[in-house]
Amino acid sequence: MHRNYNIVDNKKLTEREMEVLQYVIKGYTNREISNILMITHHTVKAHVASIIKKMGVRNRVEITVTAIEQGLISNHLRDLERP
């Protein structure tokens, strides 16, 4: 079952975008995220661009701030501790 997460103006993040979002928030690079999720870094870059557009922000820092403000970073973060 696919879930969508409301962001801005009823735009939704896909499950994969939420996965990428959680790693972006933790400070992972696109290459690191691609290695973890076993997808190309170009695909990660596309997901990040989609997240930026859907959230109505300009960069990764604003992604994190908006995610915090909207309560999108939850218990998932505990599982994503950086080594």
Image (tube, rainbow, N blue to C red):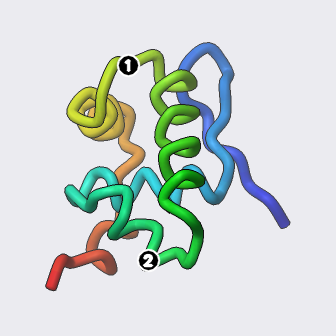
Residue at numbered disc 2: 35
Q: What is the quadrant of residue 62 in the picture?
A: top left
Quadrant containing the C terminus in the rendered view: bottom left
Task: Report, in whole angstroms, how far the alpha carbon at label 2 lies from the one at label 1.
Answer: 25 Å
In the image, residue 64 sits, relative to residue 57, either above or below, namely below
Q: Is residue 73 left or right of residue 49?
A: left
Residue at point 20%, 56% (across, down):
27
Relative to the observer, which residue lies in front, 54 or 33?
A: 33
Q: Which mark is residue 26?
A: none
Residue at point 54%, 29% (across, down):
7
Quadrant containing the N terminus in the rendered view: bottom right
Helix, strand, or loop for circle 1?
Answer: loop
In the image, residue 19 sits, relative to residue 37, either above or below, namely above
Residue at point 66%, 25% (across, down):
11
In the image, residue 74 sits, relative to residue 65, either above or below, namely below
Residue at point 58%, 69% (across, down):
39
Q: Are marks 2 and 1 in contact (CB under 8 Å)?
A: no
Q: Position of residue 61 (x, y in %)?
A: 21, 33
Mark 2: amino acid: Asn
Q: Position of residue 53 (x, y in %)?
A: 53, 22
Residue at numbered disc 1: 57
Mark 1: amino acid: Val
Relative to the observer, which residue lies in front, 35 or 15?
A: 35
Q: Position of residue 41 (x, y in %)?
A: 48, 59
| Crowding at mark 1 (Cα within 10 Å: few <14, some 14-19, many 20+) | some
Q: Is residue 46 left or right of residue 80?
A: right
